Image (cartoon, rainbow, N blue to C red):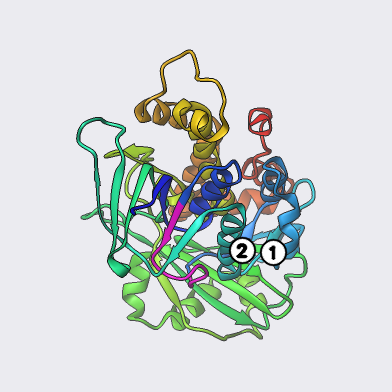
Amino acid sequence: MTPIFDVLITGAGPAGSACAARLAERGFTVALVERSEPGRPRVCGGFLGPEFEDWMRVWGWGSELDRLTKSPVHQVQVSGSGPRLVRTGLPRSGGYAVDRGIFDRWVADLAVRKGARLWTGAVVESAERDADKADGLWTARLRTGNEVIRARHRVDATGRRPAAAGKRQIFFACKAVYRGVTGLEDAVALHFIERGHVGLNPVNAEETTLCLCVDGRYLRDAQGDLDRMLKRFEAGNPSLQRQLAAARRTGPWQTCQAEPDGGPVFYRDGQFHIGDALSMVNPVIGGGIPIAMQSGVLLADLLLSRDPALQVERTGAAAAAAAPASEVEIARVFEREWREAFSKKFSFGHWLGAAERSTFASKAVMGALGMAPALLRPLVRMSRPVPSAAGAAR
């Protein structure tokens, strides 16, 4: 007999797994489909700002933090082409540095412990919806084992969308693991370079993740020699050069495009979008992991509260007086609440990303920080939102 789930989620990264965990712990049936094993290598630095622990406690998952291997981070370092390294403390209790593979396995395990059913090494090959009504059941066929799943709602959490075809200027993210990086005790670093930045994230006592976001033309000029390209950037940033002077790369480079395709996509063709499938945070300010999880939990809460049919079936509650909300109505509220929570952060990231891509603007910003280091603190606070009262009340 074909199983029927309340929600089918494609992608078991932070967004998909958080959405699945939120739904499953309230008794809803969730199918979580992941094309690989959770924990596969990703081009992601693994920095979790102070908002991450805040949100975990708001959601009632604070005790789950004990299961996660992480390194405390209390300081941010920023540099440019000048000799000065500017430092400031992170707000509240600080953040964490994590290995992204370990983090993804942890959050997928959280979803399973809460009751979601996880398929790994599986791909949704085809999906069709009952034609008799807009909110009819989905019938999805998995490529692995030719298995069929039916579900009331479908959620896309498959990650970053590719940049628009024909776009002139494409930025790329490059990631590698290093040993021997110095000067990062209890800190993460953001080093601005010519038309890009280098982020250093110490995931444990010995290893540091280096993430490089840069104009794609530099990759083309390097012809695959990313080590030589990095040396070129070190020559233009004294602080970066000092921290990497004794370091050595211990693993291969990974690369991917670092720009999303257009604006946010909340709901399309009968499917909700969360995480990077909805919209990607500019990597210059970080915070993509907590925002991805927040988007998943926000959607889960809306499905839980605005789909009376599911509430009656799962909880035995009395039927709501109002007509059940359609998916289009739920998507409209989802978009409004997401924009209220994240528009300022995304706008700030867009502004800072545009500045770093302009040689003149990036030099002006770093020059201002060099003369007035105290400016860094409000900039850091702007990029690290505090959970709202509305979010805490959910």
Looking at the image, residue 168 lies above or below residue 51? below
Q: Is residue 205 left or right of residue 318?
A: right
> Contact (CB < 8 A) between labels 2 and 1?
yes
Residue at (45, 83) in percent of width and height:
228
Q: Secondary structure at mark 2?
A: helix
**Residue 190 pos. (x, y %):** 61, 61
Q: Is residue 297 left or right of residue 268?
A: right
Crowding at mark 1 (Cα within 10 Å: few <14, some 14-19, many 20+): some
Q: How many marks?
A: 2
User: Which numbered disc, 2 or 1, marks the residue that appears first in the sequence?
Assistant: 1
Q: Which residues are magenta?
A: 31-41
Q: Main secondary structure of the magenta part?
A: loop
Which quarter of the rendering shows the C terminus? Answer: top right
**Residue 141 pos. (x, y %):** 28, 57
Q: Secondary structure at mark 1?
A: loop
Foreground pick, 14 / 164: 14
The reply to whether residue 285 is visible in this rendering is: no
The reply to whether residue 267 is visible in this rendering is: yes
Residue at (46, 44) in percent of width and height:
350
**Residue 295 pos. (x, y %):** 51, 42
Q: Is residue 16 left or right of residue 268?
A: right
Instruction: Quickly name the residue at label 2.
Output: 106
Amino acid on which disc 2 is placed: Trp
Foreground pick, 242 / 251: 251
Amino acid on which disc 1 is placed: Leu
In the displayed orientation, state which residue is furthest to the front. 1
Instruction: Quickly name the residue at label 1.
Output: 68
Looking at the image, residue 65 lies above or below residue 338? below
Which picture quadrant has residue 389?
Answer: top right
